[in-house]
Each structure stands twice: as structure tokens, then as C-alpha cells.
Amino acid sequence: NAGVTQTPKFRVLKTGQSMTLLCAQDMNHEYMYWYRQDPGMGLRLIHYSVGEGTTAKGEVPDGYNVSRLKKQNFLLGLESAAPSQTSVYFCASTYTENTEAFFGQGTRLTVV
Amino acid sequence: AQKITQTQPGMFVQEKEAVTLDCTYDTSDQSYGLFWYKQPSSGEMIFLIYQGSYDEQNATEGRYSLNFQKARKSANLVISASQLGDSAMYFCAMTRPVGTASKLTFGTGTRLQVTL
């Protein structure tokens, strides 16, 4: 009963460093999403995927890249981290468009 | 483009009272889904309730009900008999219809504080 698992849970990066956040789901969901959550801004969609091998841009895609090589995994990459990318990142997945989203526990990223 | 608006940054309610959290949305689609999620201080996102745009009856889940007014494009969450454990951030969210590039879009949230 793992659901959606994000790794890592916490990370501190220096400006200019790169990293990859991993999201894994074991529910055979088609749709997967990456959000960032900032105070007063709610959850903003970064990138999303409607199936294996597909990705699409959300509201705030700049500075991020994603890949969905396997149905169960959705990776979020930061090629050159900036302080503006300090945030809490959530991954989510859904079976169809109109079913509830299951969320990971979040990743708190600080860029100094 | 779809948009979700939550105009109440914060709300207070006394224990055992009912409270309504507002949500309005903007879309040109005929078919869509509306959701409410709860985020307690621990940070996890908890699904509360779902309403489909073609559902004729308002959705209910225990103490949660969704007051869906399609013509007004509003999907307010009503929590009856508030409990201290209801203190949290609440997010309204919306999906686009089947067959399109689906996006799950959230509002900015309302922080609910339940008082004694």
C-alpha cells in the first residue's frame, strides 16, 4: 500500500547545482503531476503526464524538465537550481481525469 | 484556460458550527470535475469530495458537502459540525474533460481555524 512515494523528502542545493526528484506510484495510474507549493500561491502545476512516454507543460515549467520513461515513475529535474526554486514539491497521480488525486508526502527543497 | 478562485485566505469557525468555504471556477468546457482537498499542518494532501459537472445532485461525504451551482460556476465546500481537527488549509481543484490534455488545477487555498 505504498501509493505515491517521493524521494528525497528534504534537500538543500547550492545555486547552479542540479538534482532529480523521483516520484513513484504503484497504482497503475495513467496521469501524473508535479506541483510546487509556495505560501499564498497554492499548488502550481509545473509539468504533467497523461501516460508513459508523454509529458506536457503546466503553469510554471521554466527551469524544470521531466521524463516519464516508465508508467510508474515521473522524474522532475532541475538543471541549474536557483533560489526562486526554493519550495515544497508535490507529486500526484490519478487513474483518470475525474478521479481523486493521490499525493506524495512532498519534498522540501531549499536553494541557497 | 481554466481557473480556480478561492477568495477567502482565512476563515474562523467555532467548534460544532457549520462553515462554507467558497470556490468559483472559470471554464468553457461542458464536462469537468471539481475536487476539494485538505492539507493539515503535517503537510499531506487529503482528498475530501468530488463533483462531476453532469452530476445533478450535490456530492456529500460524511460531514462534507459540495454546494454545486453550475450556472454561477461555484463549488463551495460546506463542513457541518466543525471539529478542532478540521483546522487546515483547504484547496479547491478542477480537472478538464476526458479526451483533452488533462490538467488538475488548484486554487490558492483557504486556511480554516476551528476555535473552542
Image: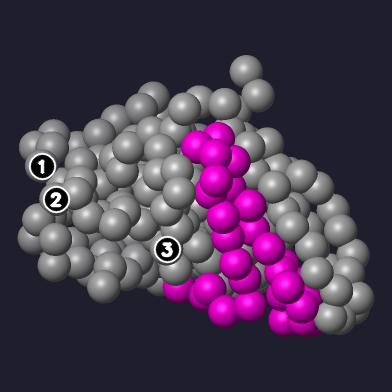
The percent coordinates of residue B105 (x first, y second) are 39, 60
Quadrant containing the C terminus of chain A is: bottom right
Q: Which residue is mark 3?
A: A56
Residue type, mark 1 in image: Tyr
> For numbered disc 3, what is the local secondary structure?
strand
Q: Compute the Cα span from label 2 to label 3.
A: 21 Å
Residue type, mark 2 in image: Ser
**In this image, A77 relative to A52: left or right?**
right
Name the chain letter of the residue that bears numbered label 2. Answer: B
Q: Which quarter of the figure has residue B70?
A: bottom left
Q: Nearer the viewer, mark 1 or mark 3?
A: 3
Which residue is depicted at the point 59% across and 41% down? A73
> For numbered disc 1, what is the local secondary structure?
loop
Residue type, mark 3 in image: Ala
Residue A41 visible here: yes
Name the chain letter of the residue that bears numbered label 3. Answer: A
**In this image, A25 relative to A106: left or right?**
left
The percent coordinates of residue B9 (x first, y second) are 52, 68
Q: Which quarter of the figure has residue B49?
A: top left
Question: Does B46 sit above or below residue B25?
Answer: above
Which residue ends up furthest to the top in the rendered image?
A1
Which residue is depicted at the point 45% across and 73% down? A59
**Tag on residue B31?**
2
Residue B14 visible here: no
The percent coordinates of residue A12 (x first, y second) are 90, 65
> For numbered disc 2, what is the local secondary structure?
loop
Query: Front-most of B22 and A8?
Result: A8
Q: Which residue is mark 1?
A: B54
Q: Which contiguous range is marked in magenta?
A: A58-87
Are discs 2 and 1 both within one chain? yes
